[in-house]
Amino acid sequence: MNLTEPYNTWLIKHIGTMVDPKLRYVLRVTATTSKGETTLDLGLDLSWFILIQVADEDKQKLEIVLELLKEPQFQEQFKATLRIPETKRFFEEFLLYNYYFLNGLKSFIDFSVLNVPIDFISQALFIKRSDLPDTPEIETDRINIVKLVLDAGFVLIGDYPVNSLGYAVRKVLLMETVPERFSVAKRMLEIGFQLFSNTPANNSELAVQLINNRADAVCLDIIKNNAANFKTIVFEIAGSAGSSNLADYFYWVKEDMLAVSFIRETIGIDISP
């Protein structure tokens, strides 16, 4: 295969003259799973081999790969590599830690294929990036990945418990340093993510956060579109008999009558008798 210069010379220098879309380069990696350490042999097509193994500047490697992907055979092999069940997690994490490649190759990747072990967006939000709490910079990186994947037409598919899908939305909505968190969360809700999870304490915290931010137009839309779900939120208020609702909390704990009126009129929840 002959690419235009200087790409052809680069390919000969780093790969050689034997270039075939069906050729596989074996990369052996050690991974830690629930069963302990295991060794995987990854069969990389030429494009993935260049991205992962060749020593050169990221910009140069991406340019070469994008040239290769103009050829249908190389593009198909690139996509086929991502469909190997045993190695999806490796490529998923490689992309999450290498935003430059993720952004450059987004039009060639079906992110729904990489929903391992959880959906790709949740993995982007929860993958460990530091032993410390997320910094504003890390939160921005996470939200940028989510926006990129949503823009690429991500489809939420997979056998995931419905309640588990609320944790990702909560993660986004609690990113107070991210101005666009409400719009991103709304887009996630529109493709099947859930607003609340099966953890009552998380749900009550999130409900309060949303009510407090109701002046934001997108946040208000989220509240209105999920009004029925707010009615299931319960609080344990000292001195009350049994569980209390959202209006009770803002009346007795926050003493915020404007919020109580909003909850009554918009969500349909009134103070308990």
Image: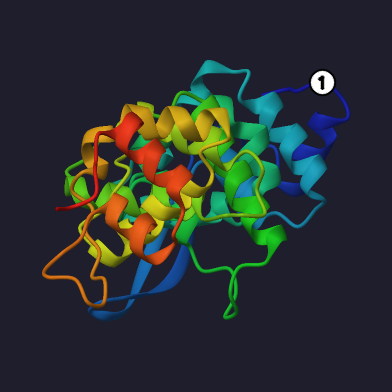
- In the image, 164 versus 91, the foreground residue is 164
Q: Is residue 41 above or below residue 133?
A: above
| Residue 245 vs residue 55, the one in the foreground | 245
Q: Position of residue 111 (x, y in %)?
A: 43, 36
Residue 228 x/y as whole percent: 21, 35
- Amino acid of disc 1: Thr
Q: Position of residue 256 (x, y in %)?
A: 46, 53
- The residue under the point 59% across, 46% down is 143
Q: Is residue 80 visible?
A: no
Q: Is residue 267 left or right of residue 122?
A: left
> Which coloring applies here?
rainbow
| Residue ID for mark 1 | 4
Quarter of the image with the N terminus is top right
Residue 8 seen in this snapshot: yes
Residue 227 falls in which quadrant of the image? top left
**Mark 1 closeness class: few <14, some 14–19, many ≥20 residues within 10 Å:** few
Would you say 241 lies left or right of 103 here? Answer: left
Name the one closer to the observer, 218 or 139. Answer: 218
Total numbered badges shown on the rendered structure: 1
Residue depicted at x 72% and y 38%: 62
Q: Label 1, secondary structure: give it.
A: loop
Q: Residue at x 23, y 62 (%)?
A: 200
Choose between 268 and 8: the one closer to the eye: 268
Across and down, in percent, residue 32 comes to 36, 77
- Give the farthest residue toward the left: 242
